[in-house]
Amino acid sequence: MKIAFIGAGSVIFSRNLINDVLSFPALQDSTLSLMDIDSGRLDLIRSLTERIVSERGLPTVVEATTDRRRALDGADYVVVMIQVGGLEPFEHDIAIPLRYGIDQSVGDSLGPGGVFRGLRTIPVLVDIARDMERLCPNAWMLQYSNPMAINTWSLYEAADITVVGLCHSVQGTAKQLAGYFDLDFDHISYWCAGINHMSWYLRYEYDGEDAYPILRTVFDRPEIFEKDKPRFEVMRHFDYYVTESTHHMSEYTPYFRRTPELVEQFATPRWDYLELCKNGWQNHYDEVRRQAAGEIPVIPERSNEYASVIINARETDEPARINGNVRNTGLITNLPDGCCVEVPIFVDKAGLHPAFVGDLPPQLAALNRTNINVQELAVQSALEGDARKAFQAAALDPLTSSLLDLRTIQKMVDDLFAAHKAWLPQFGG
């Protein structure tokens, strides 16, 4: 069995996923093919992986290459975690909208930042998928790159491969929520569906009993409410708890970031993902370097990411249930057919089996559709090279449209296109 890691230079994320894979006995006799265009980062993650394999006495074969096709050739699984252009275009995603009054805390999944991250990422993802069609047509792509829904939607539109988009927000938030209320997570069960970063805990149970009455006590417990104000405020008015963080959720709706006063009320303390990426990468790099040198150990503890669980379930036929992002083929009946939905998925040797959810509560579907509108036009813009659809995607973004008129949005989009020219070949850049 061969597992290709595309974008393996994301050293912390790669380390965690590789550690996860090697924690399953059935996956240890495999080839891990690490690929990145940054040879320095690639060499570091190769050294770390070889050390893990050696210290644990595993039969795993480790390869490293800057040649994507070599990594893909004969692969059974392709784990993708790329960031096209690195931090430079990400700075444009944040700084240009900010000049127009759009204050994005994360800016990687929706809004102007998410749209343009998608526009520059999709051509590379589609190239990877088309290489897979030729070199490993039966492989599964486990897609981790944001904007998750936009990227995954583009892949099943443009290529004939098996792809599932993976995120940690469903399982991560379920555990976080239990922690807020001092509930033992081993006794929690849930059923969650919607779209990526805006899925809903349709059921959240403790020892088999509905836990929402416990969750609703938050409105009388300011010490908990203050930890996650936008999400609890959404639950107050829309009845269900949402998966993604305060900082993401505050960007996906028009309710929390329109004025400095609202930001102060609902989105503090401030959290800037770009600044964390710029200021934190050296510490992460140094940590992995020390692990690769044997100065500090790699703890063989499995993360909450789903990639290794999926691979193990398929290889061993030990069924697993995850939440993943796939095409809506009537799975959520009041969201558009063909959009990208995040639903429970059962995995075994026979494949990926997305669960039928049916109708979401109408208020939740309505919130999801405001984001799906943006995602659909962003996908079409990227695949068709249609700049007008990129503008329309930005103009339909809930936060952007609550702040700017159409002519100003057009100026902002024009500025974003000018700044991103080098990364947008499909637009003649």
Image (cartoon, grey):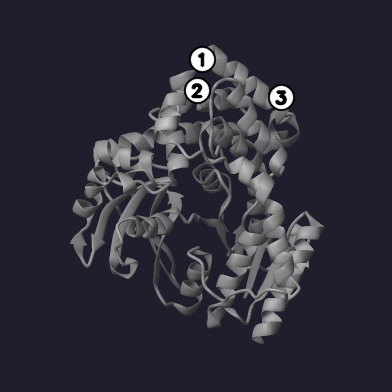
Kindly report the distance in space between the C-alpha atoms of the residues bearing marks 2 and 3: 18 Å
Q: N-terminal of the two: label 1 or label 2?
A: 2
Kindly report the distance in space between the C-alpha atoms of the residues bearing marks 3 and 1: 18 Å
Question: Marks 1 and 2: CB-CB under 8 Å?
Answer: yes
Q: Residue at x 38, y 29 (%)?
A: 255
The quadrant in which the N terminus is found is bottom right
Q: N-terminal of the two: label 3 or label 1?
A: 1
* Residue 299, position as x, y percentages in the image: 58, 75
Q: Which residue is mark 3?
A: 418
Q: Residue at x 48, y 68 (%)?
A: 310
Q: Which residue is mark 2?
A: 395
Q: Which residue is mark 1?
A: 406
The foreground one among 387 and 97 is 97
Q: N-terminal of the two: label 2 or label 3?
A: 2
Q: Is residue 130 above or below residue 252?
A: below
Q: Secondary structure at mark 3?
A: helix
Q: Residue at x 35, y 46 (%)?
A: 242
Amino acid type, mark 1: Leu
Q: Secondary structure at mark 1?
A: helix
Amino acid type, mark 2: Ala
Kindly report the distance in space between the C-alpha atoms of the residues bearing marks 1 and 2: 7 Å
